[in-house]
Image (tube, grey):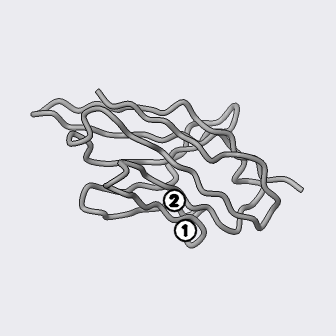
Amino acid sequence: QVQLVESGGGLVQPGGSLRLSCAASGNIESIVRMNWFRQVPGKQRELVATITKSDSTRYADSVKGRFTISRDNAENTVYLQMDRLKPEDTAVYYCNAQTVVLVATADYWGQGTQVTVSS
């Protein structure tokens, strides 16, 4: 089992920055990949950024060059630094952990944090 707690959302003006945090606890060693997703009402949840156990990262085209995913292993925390924010980045952002234990895989989710980009 893995527990995820997000923080850092809020209201920001276009062009501004926010940093989201996702603190993980529980069976940390089983995590192979951490992701940030976002969701707007009425739309599917969208994968925004990924960081693997080997620190490989990937980004959605819509955020490439503006968002940066990173992690602090000592704090068991993953971050999403969001710069040059646009109104279309407004969404609920969710942290996701993908785990593997022997041959069993599982997904864990945080509670979500609202990001609103508006003047």
Q: Name the residue furthest bottom.
A: 65
Side of 37 where 29 appears, left or right: left
Quarter of the image holding residue 113?
Answer: top right
* 59 sits left or right of 32 in the view: right
Residue 60 circle label:
2
Residue at 41 percent of width and 55 percent of height: 50
x, y percentage for residue 107?
Answer: 34, 32
**Element carrying mark 1:** loop
The residue closer to the viewer here, 7 or 50, is 7
Question: Please, is residue 110 above or below residue 14 in the view?
Answer: above
Which mark is drawn over residue 64? Answer: 1
Image quadrant of residue 67? Answer: bottom right
The residue carrying pointer 1 sits among few (fewer than 14), some (14 to 19) or many (20 or more) residues within 10 Å by Cα, namely few
Other residues around mark 2 within 10 Å, as few (<14) / some (14–19) / many (≥20): some
Residue situated in front as seen by the camera: 65 or 4: 4
Q: Identity of the amino acid at label 2? A: Ala
Disc 1 + disc 2, Cβ < 8 Å: yes
* Element marked by disc 2: loop
| Quarter of the rendering occupied by the N terminus | top left
Residue at the location (49% across, 36% down)?
5
**Residue found 32% across the figure and 55% down from its top:** 73
